[in-house]
Amino acid sequence: MKMNPQDLANCREIHAGLMAKERNSINYLFLEPVETTYFPEYLNVVKKPMDLRTLKENLEAGKYTTKEEFYADAQLIFDNAIAFNKDRDSKFVVDLAKRMIRAFDRLKKKTEAATAKKNGGDSASVSAAAGEGTKKIKLKLKRNSSVLSASSSTEDATSGTGGDAPPNKKAKKVKLKLSLGKSTNKSESKSSRSNSPASTAPIVETVGEAPMNATRRAQCYKIISSFKRRQPTNSKWFSKRVSDPMIVKDYEEKIKNPVDLGAITSKLDKNQYSTVAEFVLDLRRICSNCLQYNTTIGDSFRPVAIDCLTTMEQLCKFFIGKNESPKIVYPRLLYCWEECLKVIDALLKIQNPDDGYQTAHFFLQPVSFFCGGQWPHGYLEKVEKPMDYGTIVQNLITGVYDSVEQFAADCKLVTSNCRLFYEGTEDGPVFMEKVNRLEQALQKQLAHLSSYDKSDKGAKAKEKTRTKMLTIKQPEQAFLKEILSDLRKTTYTDKSAKITEKATLHFEKPVDTSIFTDYPKFVDTPMDLETIERKIGSNEYATPEDFEYDVLTIFRNCDKYNTPKKNVHMVALGKHTAKQFRKMFAQRLRPAERSGSVTKRAPVLPNAAAGKKILAGKKRPPSPSMEEKQVKRVSIKGPSRSSITAPKVVSSIAPSAAGKLASKSKSGGKKMAPKQSKITVTDPNAPIPMHVAIASIKESYPGRRQIKDLEGFEAECLKFLKTLMRHPWVSAERPKYIFHVPVHIIFPEIRDSYAAKIKHPMDLTTAEAKLLQGAYQTAEEFIYDISLVFSNAIEFNKDGHEIGEPMSCAYYEAATHLLKYSRWLSLEVLESCIVDCTDSPIVERGSAPNWKLTKRNAEMARKEMEQTVFNELIDKTEPGDTRFSWHEQECDKLLKSLMHTSDRKHMSFFIQMIFPANYSMYISKPIAWDLCYQKLRERKYNSIGETVADLRLIFSNALKYNEKAREVDEVSALAYDSAIHMSAKLEAAIDRMLLSVGDRIGRERIDMMNAHRQQEAEERAREEAMKLQWEKEHPGTTMEVKTKLRITHRSSYRKRPTDFDLPFFDEEDDNEESHADTISNAKALYEKQLKQRAAMRKMSLSIGISVFKRLEERAAAKIWAYQMAEKAHLERVRVQKEEEAIKAAKVQEDTGKPKGTLVSAALESVDRKHIKLALNVKLVKPKKRKKLLTSL
């Protein structure tokens, strides 16, 4: 049987995709079968080897009858790689295999989707006809298993056939599965269907059927934003995923669906929610996961989760339920869910009487959790529906239960399942004791819950839950206009160009889609500040969240459009402005909501230190010392909104800048047609952004060629320039130092002084444009211009460096390092342009202003890099630490570069310390790769040079030992050739390491000097401020300033693992506390400390009393022991006297007896010697008698 031709074509397409050129970097290990000669243990792990070549041969030979067989073998290729390499040193193969699996899945889905589209799709279509001659109507029904239940299908099927009109025999009947919600009964559905044709039958959405659209997504954003503002402290616990190393593994095992506010926001940004119900489910899971995991007695997180869930439900009802009414677009919670949680909490408080542990411990998770992930043998046969208290909490919080009876039934099911399975077993008595205690407590709690459900109080609570709605006051127009006005005053300073501009300049007007035609493809909800201002004037914002959402939509749109286009400046500008708005909005709105009005400003509080008044929630203005230390910024002033004159025009602009320059006519007041294709600048001497300057420089060099058209030395020079532009200090995206454009464009205030010192200015963009224009005849001319960029910076900043001016020092040292790095890089990248010339000057080391591309200079550059890198001391971490410092990481990369899979057959001679018997006779220091790696892990290497020396020694030893024996021994010949091959591989890896590590060492030294210089400047500024303050407070006196000598040591910071994880966050926090909040929190903390101090005093008094009592008892015990010892001594003396008296009486009695003879006296003597009698008996064998032989 042959495969279907369509499936065969799809399989060939998938195989071609796996073999494509763009996947050459990840598929090279799977092209051919694994050589078992090098890996003899491979067949012990892999039972069925497979590779891409064999897969192709089997496919063409017709060995696959279905596409599933082909898919199985294709998947087997990568599964085999994972199974064999997961526990070996070559774990990178596992990553390659996983990437290939993802590529295979994408290709499979792509081909299957194309086939389905070609065959007409897979959507269910139903044709309906109202009678003869009528056109057929096709209704595409979207299947949703969670919505359409069996009961509703049966009900609709029976009701759909009702009606008075006779059915048309020729027309095909249509059955629509309609669910009209809880309030619709059968009679209403029957009457509606009998009186209207099937083609016009309305489809009413039920729970989970509301698809996510732009409007509903906006409400979801508002819920998250409002929740963070209403719960600023509690929301921080749920802002990020659980990452505490002490509990993260246990948390992942217990919680199957982890989620946090950050993940929910990310899914909203990526439009990953198909319905509103999915969003609400994730929001509830945050609290259910917290309650399901934190189950200890008196856990402080449980009240936090309950409080957060209450706020979430109120916000969901306000922003979603109110707008969707009377539809129910997400499942409602049980009205008495808090009372149900009290039942669970009561069970959690029960303790075992013998050991004090929780009785419900083994009932909080499924039975499989305590059995290693597997159900006990026979459990599922006996227990039809497994249940535990954690699952009950999850069902309760996610809205699974519709009644109290369902909750009570599941609670009873937990203990009944345990009784059903364990009763009568060996462990039965232990579990039955726990079950009895739980059932006794559960019966009381459920009885109380049932009475509450049936009482008037429960009915009122149910009605209150259904009708009560959160109240959010509408903000006043003055309040919103004030925030918008303050937002327009914010500025943004580009960290790379040191240029300050208005943060909202590019967001004032709508984006012109006639210029940026692809803008609607990225942005579905355009928004700008003028539109927001118009909506404020028409009073369209019902809640503060509506206003906040519209403002943040501007910056989200900026990020959506500019991130794929890699417009880093606009992305950074949008994020900065959004961050400033969040801070401003939270600081203004929280005090306003607390005071009852959203138009009042933050309260004014006195500042006792300065004697001034500051706004609550505002930061104090910077001190004079802080202002003095700041680098001078260059400000860009935006064009006037009333009139625009443009002597200087730049045509390269950011997409979000379109539509910002329209002006109003003074006469008519109407908007004039803006010229949005160009940015205009009023002052010809004003600086412009760097990306605009780069574009203008390139346009000034017409006739530039495409990069792909460059050949020969020009292509090599462009490669050198691109590598240089990837340097962290001059990277085009976020440069730390500006060498890309002429200096007078970025800093026009130094135009004259720069022209006086520098006669031949040069920048990197100009050099690139000249290269593309073909202005260079040789590679050395191009290298000369590149060196001129940095040598000019050194020359101009020399005087400032001598006097210690911070900016001059920074640029002087950076240019010095980059000039040296450019020389190293050019002599390595431009290897084809290097000539052997002995007449040219030699640059031995340092930052020479010019150099020639000669072999001698290349040798000196390598020697300089080796001295820099090999003499660098390793910043050691502690032995046993799994994390390396960056020095150790470079050594680790060097070691692992020798262990590539393709080199295993060569490295097999050098991995382990296994040598011939006579090896030590020729080699004085035997070494292998394993020993080097062990020394690195034990932190025995002091410098990078020691590591390189040991690795080189491995192969030099092999060459020395096998040099003579290779002519007669085949193994020695293989080892000798392998040593030559791996030695070359090692030197290539060292060459790659020298440039990158040498550059990093230089950068770290300069950064350290800059940091030290900045610290000294801050110290001087602080001392100067103290001096000025002293002179101000004590006129006529002078304060003596003592110079302090600071000695700094370089030390590497490494974050230590801790046994706790606190919710500390960076400055991205959108809910900063105001000054009033800070004071109230400090007051609460002080009161708490007083209570704790009183409790500590009471505890200390009780401890002192107990210690004193113990001392009294110990003294009494000592007295009692002395008395008992004295009694025992007297008793021993009395017994001894009695024994002596008995002996004396016996002696006296013996002396009174008459004496016998001397012999008897001697026998009765105690000291006599005993007489020993020894009988020596000798046994004599009887002699045998000789027999007389008689003969007849």
Image (cartoon, helix red, strand yellow):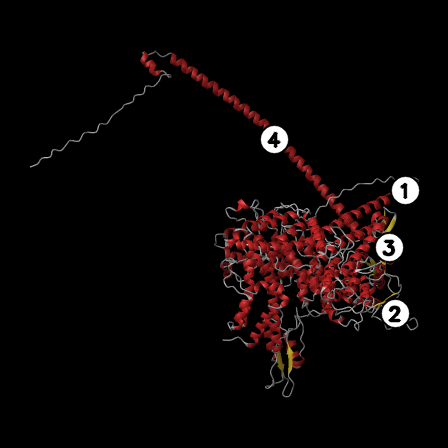
The kind of residue on which mark 4 rests is: Arg
Instruction: State how far apart marks 4 and 2 are (Cα).
Output: 96 Å
Task: Count up the numbered dots.
Answer: 4
- Residue with the mark numbered 2: 663
- Residue with the mark numbered 1: 1031
In front: 739, or 358?
739
Q: Secondary structure beneath disc 1?
A: helix
- Place of residue 1002 in the rendered image (x, y in percent of width and height, measured from the top left): 73, 51
Mark 3 neighbour class, 10 Å CA radius: few under 14, some 14 to 19, many 20 or more: few
The kind of residue on which mark 1 rests is: Glu
Check the picture and name the quadrant holding the C terminus: top left
Instruction: State how far apart marks 1 and 2 are (Cα).
Output: 53 Å
Mark 1 neighbour class, 10 Å CA radius: few under 14, some 14 to 19, many 20 or more: some
Observer-side mark, 3 or 2, equals: 3
> Which of marks 2 and 4 precedes in the sequence?
2
Q: Is residue 751 left or right of residue 1141?
A: right
- Residue with the mark numbered 3: 757
Q: Is residue 1168 left or right of residue 616?
A: left
Observer-side mark, 4 or 2, equals: 2
Q: Secondary structure beneath disc 2?
A: loop
Looking at the image, is 347 positioned above or below residue 464? above
- Place of residue 760 in the rendered image (x, y in percent of width and height, measured from the top left): 84, 58
The kind of residue on which mark 3 rests is: Lys
Q: Secondary structure beneath disc 3?
A: helix
